[in-house]
Structures are given as structure tokens and as C-alpha cells.
Image (cartoon, coloured by chain):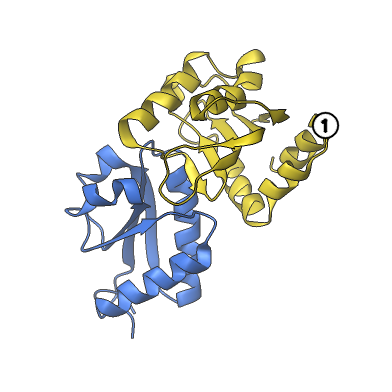
Chain colours: A blue, B yellow
Amino acid sequence: MSPAPNRPLTVLTVCGVGMGSSLILKMNAEKALASLGVEAKVEHTDVSSARGMKADVAIAQGLHADDLGSVAPVVLAISNFMDVEGLRRQLEEALREQGWLS
Amino acid sequence: MTEPVIDAIVDVRADDWRGAVHAACAPLVGVGALEPRYPERCIAIAEDHGPYMVLAPGIALAHARPEDGALRLCLAAAVLAAPVEFGHDQNDPVDVVLAFASPDDAAHLVLLRNLAEHLLAGLADQLRLAPDRATAVRALSAVR
């Protein structure tokens, strides 16, 4: 299921630098979304660039999550980058709330 | 892919998180893979934005932008003798500090993907348990 028919979910992973943490988050998000069976296009960027972008879901460290309210209707704050299962649970809950996952 | 510069040091004494970041970058600065200003930039970013480099309980990854003095693709680890606080609300204290840098926006993609996989598979504990520097370097070199 995706937010609109025939369109993959758009996901933006964000960190302060746009080089490291956001890329690890992107990999984890791709794994989590694949295990949920959600077709998605995941991109990573830094927090300044992210402010000018739009997505269905933004994923960032807690310290950036407050900056991303205008970027996506769903903003997930991550504290442990090694916890892919936790990210899967957060995504699943948020996507169900939005009606994007049945 | 460009061969990364990889090094690791163990039983590192650091007074605080800034000292730990400098320690992790020091072997890379020493061989000319990083300019001395690179760790300063990592610290400045954390002072501006908060402890962005703390990825998981006990684990930090110091990194900045290519233009911040990254001369080579490189990765290093400092295993601390005593953990330090980064000011992270959930993942403090930290005793494994990694540092990585990429000379451009693309050179690091494979290295970082491999690093993430190895961290998920227990790399931080391998580094913590390494009895000496050579063992730690071997463990981290598996990432390349």
C-alpha cells in the first residue's frame, strides 16, 4: 500500500551533516520498509536542505525532528541507529495511522 | 572504489567527548587523511546541533563534510578506557568513538554501508574486546 495509488511512499532521512548518519538511516529505513512490504523511494540529506523538501515521511535523530514539521506529515525521531526492528515498528504504526498501510 | 585509510586505537584516555573525538581522528590526521581542522568541525557541528554523532547506546560516529578537511576516504575507531558523556538523552555514556571522512559526496557510500552492516553484526563489541591495537585494526578493517 502507498499513500496514493501507483505512487511509492517518499521517505527522507535527515541528519545534521548529510553524509553519515542520514545514510545509515536510509539503509535501515529501506530494510524496514521492505520487511513491511511497502514500496518506497528513500533519499537522505542534511537538515538545512531538508527544510526546502517534501516527503510523506521524514526520519531523523530526535534533535532534528522538531525542525522537520513542514517537510512531511509523518516525522519519526530515532535514537538508536542499530535498532532496525524498532524503526520497523515506528514506521508500521505511523503508516497505519495515516491509512497508508492496512 | 578508493581504498580507505583504516586505523584503530584501544585503551584511549579521554577527558570528555571533545577529547574522544580528537582521539578518534588523531591516527587519520597523523597520516594526512584528515586536516587537523576536521575534528574541530565535528565538535563545532555537535556544539551547534547537539550530539548528532551518537548513533546508538555507547557508540558515536564523528563525521563532517568533505570540505571540512577530508583529504582521503578514511575510518578510525578509538576504544575508550573509560566512557564519556556526549549529552545524548538516551545513548550515553559512549566508549566506542568512530571517525570517518570522505573526500567527496560519493566515495564513502560503500564504506558506510559496510560499516552499518558490521555495526549491526556486533563490530562495537569486537572493538571493545580487542586486547590490543592490532586486533582492533583487524576488526575494523573487515569493514572495507
Left or right of B103? Residue B95 is right
Looking at the rendered structure, the kind of residue marked 1 is Ala
User: Which quadrant holds residue B31?
Assistant: top right
Q: Residue at x 52, y 13 (%)?
A: B36
Nearer-the-camera pick, A81 or B89: B89
Q: In the image, residue B130 lies at what x, y percent?
A: 79, 40
Image: A4 above or below B86: below
Q: Quadrant of residue B41?
A: top left
Q: Quadrant of the N terminus of chain B?
A: top right
Of residues B56 and B107, the one drawn nearer to the viewer in this rendering: B56
Q: Position of residue A3 (x, y in %)?
A: 26, 74
Identified at 48% across, 42% down, the residue is B54
Q: Nearer the viewer, residue B31 or B94?
A: B94
Instruction: Answer whether residue B9 is visible to the viewer in this image.
Output: no
In x, y percent, where is residue A26? 45, 54
**Image height of B113 relative to B21, above or below:** below
Check disc 1 and report the residue beneath it: B134
Q: Position of residue B9 (x, y in %)?
A: 72, 28
Q: Secondary structure at mark 1?
A: helix
User: Where does the C terminus of chain B fall, quadrant-wise?
Assistant: top right
Instruction: Give the letter of the chain under mark 1.
Output: B
Instruction: Work out whether residue B66 or residue B22 is closer to the camera in this orientation and state it.
Output: B22
Quarter holding residue B23: top right
